[in-house]
Image (cartoon, grey):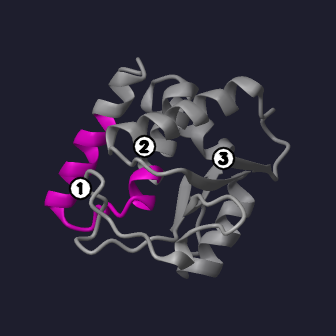
């Protein structure tokens, strides 16, 4: 289950955008073989609000494109093909689904970056969702090797969605 919370009015948040986001989430879940029911909260915002959230939670006083707030902790740092023990605290007692965490996306920044990088808004939005999903599944890009792993996965998932550079 994906819960959307649109907190901005600068870019019309359409049903097509919701569908694209859902497809990007499901493609990442499938690619990573995450085989449990899940819940995910996605906040849609603008540059101003994401800057405030970034400052509040990360101490960085600048706008960004996407923020990820994972709920799960993985033994080896990331999810691996069904090999994870989910603690009872990680499950919503009402739905029985694993709570992956929260994703915050600035549609305004996604639009800016799509122009800057010379590709479609849809590709940029899907990239941000896939990137965030990988964070929610424990991946990071602090080290060069980890960054290369994430980039490879992002490109494969986007290619599977037909969103080629």
Q: Position of residue 67 (x, y in %)?
A: 54, 61
Mark 3 and mark 2 lie on one chain; the one further toward the N terminus is 3
Residue at 65% from the left image edge and 28% from the top image edge:
19
Residue underneath mark 2? 29
Residue 127 in sight here: yes
Residue drawn where x is 39% and y is 37% of the image = 30
Question: How far is the residue under mark 3 from the one under mark 2?
Answer: 12 Å
Q: Which residue: 55% across, 54% down?
A: 66
* Residue bearing mark 3: 2
Please state the horizontal and vertical placement of residue 39, each as a whole percent of the image.
61, 55
CA separation in Å, label 1 and label 3: 27 Å
**Vertical arrangement, residue 79 with respect to residue 71, above or below:** above
Whole-angstrom CA distance, mark 1 to mark 2, is 19 Å
Quarter of the figure with the C terminus: top left
Q: Is residue 149 magenta?
A: yes
Q: Please provide the residue range marked out in magenta.
A: 133-155
> Which residue occupies the extreme top position in the image?
162
Task: Verify CB contact (< 8 Å) between mark 3 and mark 2.
Answer: no
Q: Main secondary structure of the magenta part?
A: helix
Residue 160 found in image quarter: top left
Check disc 3 and report its element: helix, strand or loop: strand
**Residue under label 1:** 147
Between label 1 and label 2, give the one nearer the viewer.
2
Which dot, 1 or 3, sits closer to the camera? 3
In contact (CB < 8 Å): disc 1 and disc 3: no
What residue is at 52 percent from the left and 62 percent from the top?
A: 68
> Where residue 107 sits: x, y (%)?
67, 42
- Give the numbered dot on residue 43: none
If you read the primary sequence from the N terminus, does the residue marked by circle 1 or circle 2 appear first?
Answer: 2
Could you say whether the residue bearing mark 2 is in a helix, strand or loop? helix
């Amino acid at each position: 289950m994906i819960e959307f919370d649109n907190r901005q009015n600068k870019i019309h948040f359409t049903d097509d955008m919701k569908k694209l986001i859902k497809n990007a989430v499901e493609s990442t879940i499938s690619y990573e073989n995450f085989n449990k029911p899940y819940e995910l909260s996605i906040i849609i915002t603008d540059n101003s609000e994401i800057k405030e959230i970034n400052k509040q939670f990360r101490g960085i006083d600048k706008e960004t494109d996407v923020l990820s707030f994972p709920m799960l902790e993985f033994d080896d740092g990331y999810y691996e093909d069904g090999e994870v023990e989910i603690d009872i605290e990680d499950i919503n007692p009402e739905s029985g689904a694993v709570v992956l965490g929260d994703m915050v996306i600035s549609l305004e920044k996604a639009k800016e970056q799509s122009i800057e990088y010379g590709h479609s808004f849809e590709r940029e939005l899907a990239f941000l969702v896939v990137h965030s999903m990988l964070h929610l599944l424990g991946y990071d890009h602090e080290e060069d090797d980890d960054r290369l792993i994430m980039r490879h996965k992002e490109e494969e998932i986007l290619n599977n969605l037909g969103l080629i550079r």
